[in-house]
Amino acid sequence: MWWNSGMSVIEVAGLVKHYGDIEAVAGVDLHVDAGEVFALLGPNGAGKSTIVEILEGYRSKTSGSVSVLGFDPQKAERSYRERIGIVLQETAIEEQLTVGEVIDVYGSVFPNRRATGDLIELVGLDEKTDSRIKTLSGGQRRRLELALGIVGDPELIFLDEPTTGFDPSARRQAWSIVENLTSLGKTVLLTTHYMDEAQYLADRVAVIARGRIVAEGTPDTLGGRESASTLITFQSNGQSIEGLPSDDISHSENGRVTVRSTDPTRDLYRITGWAIDHGVDLVGLSVSRPSLEDIYLRLTGGDGDV
Amino acid sequence: MSERPSSFGLLLGQTQYQNKIFFRNPLAAFFTLFFPLMIFVVFALVFGNQEIDYLGVTTAQYYAPSMAVFAAVSATYTNLAVTTAYQRDQGILKRVRGTPLPSAVYMGGKIISAVMIATIAVLIMMVIGVVFYGVQIYAATLASAIMTFIVGVASFAALGLLVAAVVSSGEAATAVTNATLLPLAFFSGVFIVPSQDSPAWLDAVASFFPLKHFVEPFVSAFNPLTVGSGWNWVSLAYMVLWGLVAVFLAVRFFKWEAPTGGGGRSRRKKKASAAS
């Protein structure tokens, strides 16, 4: 696949992190190429933030090897920090300063910096340039944090749950900012609780549970989603469906009929043909693939905090 | 890649930014700049601005410099300890740590800003003393007063950062700074002119801590009976020693994240009370 040919930005092998007796990360391998958006998906306490904070240089590892942009993040070198951008989980920003002042002061430490005005426009805070941080709403703060994460024009951006607490329109806006970054060739490592976010933004997804990667793939193929059974459902409305030509039929109490199919084109043709021949009305007929969420819940053993 | 910003420019920017944070926080600005001034005015009113018997100076001539020292210590020790600890609680230090800004430049900006605030506090106090209370300033001892001030604020800035390094939260920093500064201020002759009858052990305790070594030489530089140029090398050396030990321990124990990890929802409520 195309990403295997790219230049590697993140290389992690056998990463382990203990907090006392607790094994927060239990042997993780990761490989992220330049220009990729890679999502770590998992319930709270699964270890995704620990992994990200090790890559960001905030935490030391217990064992394993970690290389990001060719650096060992644990050394927290200045030249490493000049090339990455970090959007932490919700943290405070100096309340007394204005949006413009905060972007100026945080931008001033980078050799390559985006112009304050452009950045404010990009995150949609134009009208708040001269407002104190304490007057911003939660969503506006989060967008400012996103701006602070990319003010140094980084090659690699860490987004730790970037849209938690956003309303749907703010979320769409945040997503379009991330898309804008990837169109510039930036690499993004994202953690999220939201299936739709991973589905929309990520080129590849790794599902983390109990400190391990339990599945990895594109959002479309994750966990065998591609080959999993398609569900054909309709309402029987008391009509007899005796003789319905299918092998795997289940009835629910409310009269809903579900047919599992590994060959939906053929099965659908047979079911609808049978219905026309027998004068049966297939009320509410629908065909669906298992959602990423179904797969996720199955992979994480249903202990998800979705 | 463009050129890296110069360390001097960064230091300047960080200092300005810390100054903005301080002066836009009315409560911190009030307690640091005007509270000592208020005590001074009240003392001058209560005691009357007459000569203190055995010292040979007026009330104002004693309390203007002593409250100036109190203001300078509040601006460095208390201010740095409390704001730094609250900024750590809020995750601001964690955010800074994730940028290429060298830690030394960030801390340097904080210290220079605190020293500037201390300078402003001392100037306000002395100017009001001179203009409204007839406080005299003597050329012969001015150099030693300035040196005492510089070494004193540097030492107390280091002690403030040491408190920030060892406490677990902003609330704890507030408690520790008040519980140390206020009693010491009473023992060390900041609020009460030391009486000749006070027990020797009290004087010994006060002499162990650095505050007395800041107040005594500074006040005596404004005493007309002081002979010579007022240099007190022992006190200066004492403050330098305290400062160096504080720097060493602060660097050794400083943490950039709160014990439970910076940021997070549960910490948001603290913003309201933050004195940053």
Image: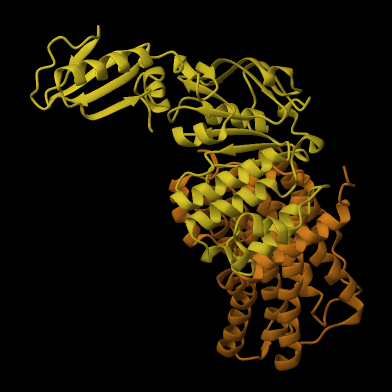
Chain colours: A yellow, B orange
Q: Is residue B106 left or right of residue B188?
A: right
Vertical placement of residue A288 versus B5, above or below: above
* Residue B157 position within the rendered picture, expressed as x and y whole percent measured from the top left: 72, 56
Tell me what residue is drawn at x 66 percent, y 91 percent. Answer: B50
Q: Is residue B76 visible?
A: no
In this orientation, does residue B225 appear? yes
Q: Quadrant of the N terminus of chain B?
A: top right
Residue ranking furthest to the top: A247
Question: Number of labelled discs?
Answer: 0
Q: From the viewer's perspective, is residue B249 above or below residue A117?
A: above
Q: Position of residue B9 (x, y in %)?
A: 86, 57
Q: B178 or A137: which is nearer to us?
A: A137
- Which residue: 52% across, 35% down? A200
Q: Residue at x 70, y 31 (%)?
A: A35
- Quarter location, residue A73: top right
> Is residue A101 shown above or below A289?
below
* Residue situated in front as seen by the camera: B156 or B272: B272
Is B12 in front, or is A300?
A300
